Amino acid sequence: MTIVNVQIEDQNGGKFQKSVEVHNDQLVKCGVCGGSVLLDGKKGFKISRLLVGAPQDIYVQVPIPYCAKCGNEIDNQPQVESENVARDSAALK
């Protein structure tokens, strides 16, 4: 069991912090190799000055989590699969 502090923004733009208890059965797993250790990477994007009305192109970096085991990029909304659900659904097959 691990307790993490999460900063949450409500619908009105207000921010608050909440302590949340997480368990090992809530690990995010890589869809390719099943690894559960994620590293932080960044993707660089060039945005045309014509799109934003700026005098020159803009370069931005977007954080991207990726699997430490196989290097697979994890999408922005990774699937969190409970091991209990996986075991139960496997038993039904």
Image: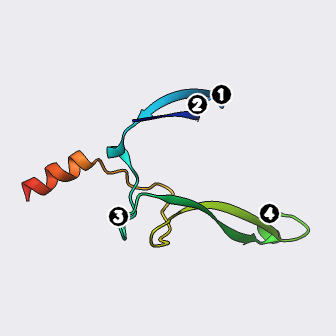
Secondary structure, mark 3, is loop
Give the mark, 4 or 2, whose residue is nearer the N terminus. 2
What whole-number distance in Å separates the C-alpha atoms at marks 3 and 4?
40 Å
Dot label at residue 34: 3
Label 3 sits on what residue type?
Gly
Q: Is residue 73 left or right of residue 85?
A: right
Dot label at residue 74: none
Image point 51% across, 57% down: which residue? 76
Q: Are marks 2 and 1 in contact (CB under 8 Å)?
A: yes
Image point 21% across, 53% down: which residue? 86
* Location of residue 37 in the rendering, given as x and y in whole percent from the top left corner: 46, 58
Count how many numbered circles sit on residues in the image: 4
Give the mark, 4 or 1, whose residue is nearer the N terminus. 1
Q: Which quadrant is the C terminus positioned in? A: bottom left
What whole-number distance in Å separates the C-alpha atoms at marks 1 and 3?
36 Å
What residue is pinned by disc 4? 52
What residue is pinned by disc 1? 14
* Location of residue 91 in the rendering, given as x and y in whole percent from the top left corner: 9, 54
What residue is pinned by disc 2? 10
